[in-house]
């Protein structure tokens, strides 16, 4: 298996990034476009940036965000307003400057010879799958997307997925779009229908775990992007460990993307989002 | 004293006239700024952000005789101007540390202080004995905030007798400088400092983290899997400064100050309070170049104040 | 128990269904929110901002037998998410307190807890004996963070024996509820709590301020005239929560939690950790209406969480 | 002596104030105009407001500022950028909202029958003297102003003083305007030349003390406005005490204006400004 999208050979750096645009895209969800030429130049799908949102605030740590898309000179972040950091972030306007470390982490791995990929996104889990979908499509890999959200409005990045995927099927908790219920119903169906070579999952840990089990049962390789609370983001503090079959690994450098098979699902994810 | 870094004039731009070198337990450091244990790993992760040869010293993460797997996640929680951690001293054990970390550090031009953890007195001595076989260790920093499993789990550092016992055990097996890192979770830190001084410590460093707790009101659960953890960052700086000032007045060995240092000015405050050197911890997470920015900030302070040597600042508080 | 405030349904708009009343040492409070001593004077200054009858209880500033003039200025310094103070318990003495403050408070519909200071055991007893002649005192809060002049100036609250001795002395002269306010500057706060419980305390409150220090690098002088002072505010909340949790697990008398409470959610965290009531201190300086906003915040939390009585929250942490 | 400008009969209140204008008037000095109708309606010369500059910052306390001028609905504040709070303040723009407690403190007392007043301002000490000069002039009191600053540009509120005072004499440390040297040289001269009934002083404590001594020597009554670090601003915390001949008084309610004769100059002022 060749790692065509590995982050290990890119060196993270600290970059002064400038807000190009910061738009509300759904209730409590924003899309932030940052001028970040050096990060944009090397970022791979599934990698993230570690952003210092405010300098003189009463909270001190950076906040990690997946790179949703990258273009020449800029990266996009899709973020959900949860607490102090993301609230601050939602108030940033064009021209504001922050600093970001990135690209960080080891992203999605696309084995050579991949023909058909299934992307499963729960809520903001769509964020790190955006760039992946584009890269896969550009390589001629057939992409199916199973996407879930509480309600239709929260099906973020839908245009992106629709434009590059062969098919996108959705589920919402309230039935306002697609199936009523969990995305796992859709992923189960697409796994059977499409017989993909690889499943890429990001979403709440319970959902990722369920999809991983579906993939395992179907005999399909599966990668999951996991979230942990992160202090340093660069592998030094050990705050972000994930228990794996080969011991505790750091989500920030050994992940956030892990082979589903190596993850010991120990229920130590960050508290579920509101 | 095994490794002696050249007493260097700081390399900061335009700072040719400020002498930052300080001496701790016979070790001459090119400047008073060290990393704080557990916040800089063994430096590899920071090498892209910091020229390690700029540091006064690099203090490694805590090393124990056997591998420790640490605590469950979540291991951190953010608090007002601070953070809690309950990493639990996860480390691969001294053997792996020598192979992977010390070997790599040997290629870096920076004095290495190895932070030592243990659950029993014998543990501490075992780690140091193993490290005695290695070159490239400038000093030991003995972390006595570890729970003492022989004595019901209270940390060694919370009473004079066990603190002194650990110090003596380490002292017995090495001639290298021994720095004892004190716990702030005590009634009288000066008393503990005097006890480890009497037991043979060459220096003390303080403070380790304050024991704290955070609760998620929504889930009604502690934010840390382990319930309690160590508080660090700017929030604790006033407590750290007070303890450094108290201890500097109580012992005659050098004091290394630590706790919430984010800027050069913060570092200067610790020197004024009586510290001969400082450690930068949580700041590394906020700004991976923090150590160098602190060094540059000290230089700038000295230049603005017309001070030619950082040593003039040590204990120079005007009370 | 002399004064019994009506167990009241909170008066917050739209909150008719949440019962906030709690009981501390036989005293039923309309809600768990008190003022923290020294941050609310005797309430007069806040009367324009807060309807005092909304408070669970009003804790007065510290009162001593003779007038104390307190420390020199500067008496405060700001720190990251906190502040240091070295007011030095300035107060006009118990006689003037009874005339000016208690008399005024008698006209307010709020249980009054008098915070008591002393430099000797006899001092404490003298203050309480004088106050026994007054009506309108719901309880005493004994501040054992005062320096013990009979024993070299270490605070009474930093060792079990003097803490217990003060408690016994006060207990001997009153049948009113005695709350002992613990110092956080100790190795094992649970041990002190057990000692004062055994000595007759009806409740404990914690934490008082953490001993800290701030330095002005520019002038090279301490920011406080007295060099050291007490740290309060959000910075200390993690330490306060941890201590409340430890003490609540160690004693069977009620615990009153204090330290960095700014919002209703903060208060809920202390209740979950095991506090039966809370005190709001530094927040009063930031927002003179803080106490009422904390009460409203607790009500809102209960309503969102479908909780009908704040008492359900006490010690309900899911560890 | 009748207190015609006492603050004791006005009740402080918490008001949401809105920035109308925030202009740089000198190096490191700003003039902030705040829409604050309730405070503006009762404020007296020498009183101050206690402003919560930022809510989620790493510093928590309010900052006290004298009311420099008041008009229908608005108050003006003249501030010097010293640290975190005033730096934040300098970044506030029209439309921004803060909250302020005020009017606070007991202001300048103008005895009935005052014919001639001497105002002595050192640096930003000019701030609380602005409104006083206007009120005095409006009452027909002859006003002389002795003003000092490090350099000409820092002679703030000069237009105001020039427009209402009979004469304004200045001193600067660098001689760029008026006398070279301390304002005390000017105040000494004006005391002798004008024979005022009352001297009103605000500035660094050493200067206020020196002027008070000059007034005492000349047998002229003198009031000084003193600064102390303040937490509550409303008399509850005892952080702001001034030692007087009748014991420790609180600068926030018993002051900031004190009769010079009652002040025990004990050198406990806040650290001198940069
Ligand atoms: C590698 C990685 C990539 C991420 N990518 C994205 C992304 O693309 N878009 C996005 O919106 N978020 C992403 N996150 C999550 C994001 O970092 C957090 O939502 C953010 O840090 C919350 O900051 P805050 O200050 O707003 O919340 P806080 O005030 O810190 O917390 C508010 C609440 O949110 C909870 N919380 C905190 N962090 C997380 C988290 N990681 N996941 C779930 N709940 C959390 C807290 O426990 C608390 O209950 C990513 C996290 C990681 C580790
Ligand atoms: C009653 C009263 C009225 C005031 N009126 C005005 C006014 O009209 N205009 C104005 O510019 N300022 C005024 N001040 C001073 C003003 O409150 C402080 O300059 C301000 O609080 C500094 O806040 P900061 O966060 O910028 O500085 P900080 O970060 O708090 O401190 C920065 C530096 O300034 C010093 N400092 C802090 N407070 C003062 C102070 N009061 N005086 C001198 N140095 C101080 C500190 O010691 C430190 O060295 C007044 C103060 C009082 C008590
Ligand atoms: C994530 C983390 C891990 C730490 N690990 C260790 C350790 O292994 N050994 C040790 O002695 N101190 C350890 N500490 C304590 C720090 O070295 C330092 O004493 C403390 O954090 C206070 O300094 P700061 O406020 O600058 O972070 C750790 C601190 C943090 C935040
Ligand atoms: C200015 C000030 C004065 C205080 N005076 C007293 C006092 O007289 N007696 C006492 O027991 N505690 C006193 N305290 C401690 C507080 O009551 C409280 O325990 C502490 O500030 C922690 O709570 P907080 O973080 O909410 O302020 C004082 C605190 C401050 C800030
Ligand atoms: S966040 Fe520090 S090791 Fe991963
Ligand atoms: S500032 Fe609190 S009493 Fe004056």
Image (cartoon, coloured by chain):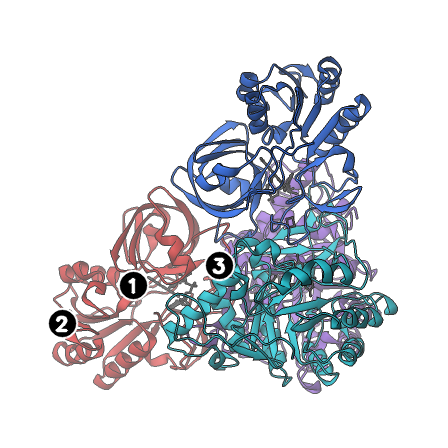
Chain colours: A blue, B cyan, C purple, D red
Query: Residue at label 2?
Result: D178
Q: Residues within 10 Å of mark 1 (few under 14, many from 20)?
A: many
- Residue D2's quadrant in the figure? bottom left
Q: Residues within 10 Å of mark 3 (few under 14, many from 20)?
A: many
Comes first in the chain, label 2 or label 3: 3
Query: Residue at label 3?
Result: D61
Tell me: D188 left or right of B78.
Answer: left
Residue plotted at (33% across, 65% down): D107
Instruction: Tell me which chain the residue with mark 2 is part of.
Output: D
Q: Is mark 1 on a helix, strand or loop?
A: loop
Q: Distance between the residues labelled 1 and 2?
A: 22 Å
- Residue D183's quadrant in the figure? bottom left
Image position, residue D119 (x, y; %): 22, 70
Residue plotted at (59% across, 32% down): A128
**Residue A264 in the image: above or below residue A180:** below
Q: Quadrant of the N terminus of chain B?
A: bottom right
Q: Is mark 1 within 8 Å of ligand 2?
A: yes
Residue C258 visible? The answer is: no
Comes first in the chain, label 1 or label 2: 1
Residue A206 circle label = none
Depth order, front residue of C223/A140: A140
Front of the two marks 2 and 3: 2
Image position, residue B233 (x, y; %): 59, 60
Q: Is mark 2 on a helix, strand or loop?
A: loop
Image position, residue B222 (x, y; %): 73, 49
Instruction: Tell me which chain the residue with mark 3 is part of.
Output: D
Front of the two marks 1 and 2: 2
Front of the two marks 1 and 3: 3
Q: How far apart are marks 1 and 3 (CA)?
A: 21 Å
Residue D128 circle label = 1
**Residue C300 in the image: above or below residue C131:** above
Depth order, front residue of B165/B124: B124
């Amino acid at each position: 298996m060749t790692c065509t999208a590995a982050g290990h050979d890119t060196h993270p750096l600290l970059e002064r990034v400038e807000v190009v645009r910061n738009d509300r895209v759904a209730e409590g969800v924003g899309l932030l476009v940052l001028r970040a030429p050096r990060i944009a130049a090397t970022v791979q799908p599934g990698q993230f940036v570690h952003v210092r949102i405010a300098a003189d605030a009463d909270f001190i740590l950076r906040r990690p965000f997946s790179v949703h898309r990258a273009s020449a000179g800029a990266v996009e972040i899709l973020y959900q307003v949860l607490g102090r950091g993301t609230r601050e972030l939602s108030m940033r306007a064009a021209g504001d400057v922050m600093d970001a470390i990135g690209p960080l982490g080891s992203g999605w791995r696309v084995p050579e010879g991949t023909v058909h990929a299934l992307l499963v996104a729960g809520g903001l889990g769509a964020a790190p799958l955006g760039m992946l979908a584009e890269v896969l499509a550009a390589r001629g890999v057939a992409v199916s997307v199973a996407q879930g959200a509480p309600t239709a409005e929260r099906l973020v990045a839908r245009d992106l997925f629709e434009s590059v995927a062969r098919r996108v099927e959705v589920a919402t908790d309230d039935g306002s779009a697609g199936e009523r219920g969990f995305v796992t119903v859709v992923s189960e169906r697409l796994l059977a229908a499409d017989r993909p070579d690889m499943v890429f999952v990001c979403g709440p840990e319970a959902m990722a775990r369920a999809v991983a089990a579906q993939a395992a049962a179907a005999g399909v390789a599966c990668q999951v992007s996991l979230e942990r609370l992160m202090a340093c983001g660069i592998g030094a503090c050990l705050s972000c460990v994930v228990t794996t079959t080969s011991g505790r690994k750091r989500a920030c450098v050994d992940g956030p993307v892990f082979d589903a098979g190596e993850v010991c699902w120990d229920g130590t994810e960050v508290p579920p989002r509101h | 004293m095994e490794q002696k870094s050249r007493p260097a004039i700081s390399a900061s731009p335009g700072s040719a006239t400020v002498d930052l070198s300080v001496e701790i337990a016979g070790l001459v450091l090119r400047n008073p700024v060290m990393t704080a244990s557990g916040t800089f790993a063994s430096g590899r992760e920071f090498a892209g952000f910091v020229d390690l040869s700029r540091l006064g010293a690099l203090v490694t993460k805590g090393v124990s005789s056997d591998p420790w797997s640490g605590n469950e996640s979540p291991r951190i929680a953010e608090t007002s101007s601070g953070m809690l951690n309950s990493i639990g001293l996860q480390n691969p054990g001294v053997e792996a540390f020598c192979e992977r970390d010390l070997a790599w550090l040997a290629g870096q031009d920076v004095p290495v202080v190895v932070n030592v953890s243990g659950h029993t007195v014998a543990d501490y001595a075992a780690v140091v004995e193993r490290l005695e076989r290695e070159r490239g260790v400038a000093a030991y920093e003995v972390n006595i905030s570890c729970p003492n499993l022989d004595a019901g789990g209270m940390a060694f550092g919370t009473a004079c007798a066990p603190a002194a016992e650990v110090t003596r055990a380490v002292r017995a097996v090495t001639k290298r400088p021994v720095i004892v890192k004190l716990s702030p979770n005590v009634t009288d830190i000066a008393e503990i400092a005097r006890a480890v001084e009497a037991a043979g410590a060459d220096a003390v460093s303080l403070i380790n983290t304050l024991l704290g707790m955070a609760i998620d009101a929504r889930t009604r659960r502690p934010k840390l899997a382990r319930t309690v953890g160590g508080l660090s960052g700017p929030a604790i700086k006033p407590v750290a400064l007070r303890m450094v000032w108290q201890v500097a007045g109580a012992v005659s060995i050098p004091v290394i100050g630590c706790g919430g240092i984010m800027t050069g000015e913060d570092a200067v405050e610790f020197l004024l309070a009586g510290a001969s050197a400082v450690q930068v911890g949580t700041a590394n997470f906020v700004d991976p170049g923090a150590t160098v920015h602190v060094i540059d900030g000290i230089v700038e302070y000295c230049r603005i104040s017309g001070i030619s040597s950082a040593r003039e600042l040590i204990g120079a508080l005007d009370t």
